[in-house]
Amino acid sequence: MLNKLALNGCKSRWKDYLVLFSGLLISTAIFYMFQVLAMNKQFLKSNSPISVTPIVFHLGTFLLILITIVYVLYANTFLMSMRKKEYGMFIVLGSKTRTIRSLVMIETLFIGLISTIVGMLVGIGLTQVVARLLARQLQANLAHLQTIYPPAIGVTILVFGLLFLFAALKNSWHIGHQPLLSLLKDQQKADQIAVKFGVGQTIQLLAGIVCLVIGYWSLGQLQNLQMTALMIASVTIILGTYWTINTLFRAIINVLRHSQFALQGLHSFTLGQLNFRIVDYTKILSMISILFALAMGAVTVGLSFQQNVQMVTEQSEYYDVVINNATTNDRHVLKQLPIKSNLQYKYKIVSGQVYFKRAQFQAHAWQQVGTPQHKQAVTATIKQLQTADSVANYHFNRQLIPQAYDKPMHWVSQQQFAQLVAPTNQVQFMRVNDFSAQISKIQKIVHAQQQRYPRMKSEGATAKVASYAMVNEMFSGLEFMGFFLGFAFLAMLASCLMFKILSSADQDRMRYQMLHKIGARSKVLKHSINQELGVLFGIPAVIGIIHVLFGMQIFSLLLQNPYHHIWLPILLFSVLYGLYYLLTTALYKLIVLKNK
């Protein structure tokens, strides 16, 4: 009987439960996807040889579990807010409290079971899709990535099973120990009123700003203070975020409520709503601000690693393509490349000696990469090329066919070159527009060179391609993890805020009904909702972006330019976060503006 009653309860409010299910599906799917990466040691080892990666993933798993707990608790609050009045009516009609407690447990566990199973199925599909998309974008192989990974399935079932069991016990205990009148009148409960902004709040605001300044300064001193800087930054930024949101938000509301702005439309009501919410929302807005910064930071670092692949590759060799004795097929591929410069030198190998035409080098000088201090290309002289232990000699000599490796080189006149009895070889040094974009075509040429000259050294004519492959293999795993971790955190934190807002929607419905009865138009009510929820979503986004802009200093030791194209992840996150805002406002309006 209880099972049938619980099922009928879910059926009767399937639209509200659909919102809950969608959020829990996202939570389960993201958690499963992350576990597929975090627990697969072969994947981590194959795609990122850096030893710190497992530590980063263990930390990421810990953070993900924490935010998942918060998320499920908020989703559970949303569930209970919808059914409390119904449970109270069952008791009024004669049901025993013990029966209602069992009903609550069954409903909670049923929702948890269905959402976990379906969420894992969605997670398997998403892992496959996202892995393919990111692998294609990052030009990574992503070896040993398994979308159906039994250990990840076990951990997901265990974690969410324990979470929903805890939620079921919590709900059951809460219903059993709550007075009947409180259940029936739960929607009429008043929000906690914020304390009037005064001297204490002003001191707290100043303290919050000082903490943030200290935290940002510590991040810039990471090279000198190391772990001490991280510890100082962690404590001061968290405290500064909480105090700043708690007081600055209230100060702005206080100023607006005493200005002409409050007299326009429903602004006075909207500011009042925000003032009622501030005490209850400070903690979650602070948490979301920090997680927003971590999520965006992970994606930004991933993009920076991708840029670093190009930068490190450019420092390995100056020329993008080197061809010895080009064939017809080579020339066909070259026609497809956007060649920026093309140097051609002829040479002969006689009695272990390599001879070049001096006039060709005088007309078109050979260049090599500059030093880390002077990144401009350096023109090599013939004398430098002839010196056996020089950098120029090392890079130039190994770009020739294997028969010329480590052989003395000479530059002679056109007449002397013509008198040498030996086959004429020709080497071409070329630069293209955007090496990484043309890598597939360049690899075809390199493969053809290796087929013709099996002894071609990896640091020879294939040097730049080999360097690109090595660096890309090293960084691609970290890039993939950064993207995955960032978007997982974004979806979870935005969903937490969404369910926090939706869990109080039933309580807000009466206020909007009263406004509608006294003449407020639906269009005006919807505009008020857009403004109110826009502020709640905007605060953590703005503070999170500020945290990222200062926090990227941490990676200046690893990345040449951690701020390169930082506008891209900011724009991407803003769009995705904005979609969550639009979804939340739409669902909130469906609840509070019913029958409008």
Image: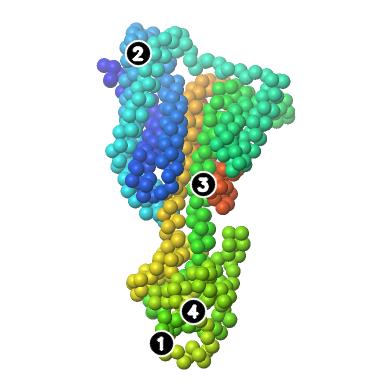
**Which residue does the numbered mark 3 point to in the structure image?**
301
Mark nearer the N terminus (3 vs 1): 3
Q: Quarter-wise, where is residue 97 in the image?
A: top left
* Foreground disc of the pair 3, 4: 4
Kind of residue sitting beneath label 3: Val
Q: Secondary structure at mark 2?
A: helix
For the image shown, how many numbered marks are present on the structure?
4
In this rendering, the answer to whether 186 lies above or below 227 is above
Query: Tag 3, which secondary structure?
Result: helix
Residue of label 2: 100
Whether pointer 3 and pointer 1 mark residues with C-beta atoms closer than 8 Å, the reply is no
Horizontally, residue 456 falls left or right of residue 313, namely: left
Disc 3 or 4, which lies upstream in sequence?
A: 3
Of badges 4 and 2, the one in the foreground is 4
For the residues labelled 4 and 2, the Cα–Cα distance comes to 93 Å
Q: Residues within 10 Å of mark 1 (few under 14, many from 20)?
A: few
Q: Position of residue 59 (x, y in %)?
A: 45, 36
- Label 4: few (<14), some or many (≥20) within 10 Å? many
Say which residue label 4 marks.
Answer: 409
Q: Earlier in the sequence, mark 2 or mark 3?
A: 2
From the image, state whether disc 1 or disc 2 is nearer to you: 1
Can you tell which of label 2 and label 3 is closer to the viewer? 3
Quarter-wise, where is residue 278 in the image? top right
Residue found farthest to the left? 1
Kind of residue at disc 2: Ile
The residue at which mark 1 appears reads as 422
Q: Is residue 337 visible?
A: no
Does residue 85 lie above or below 402 as drawn?
A: above
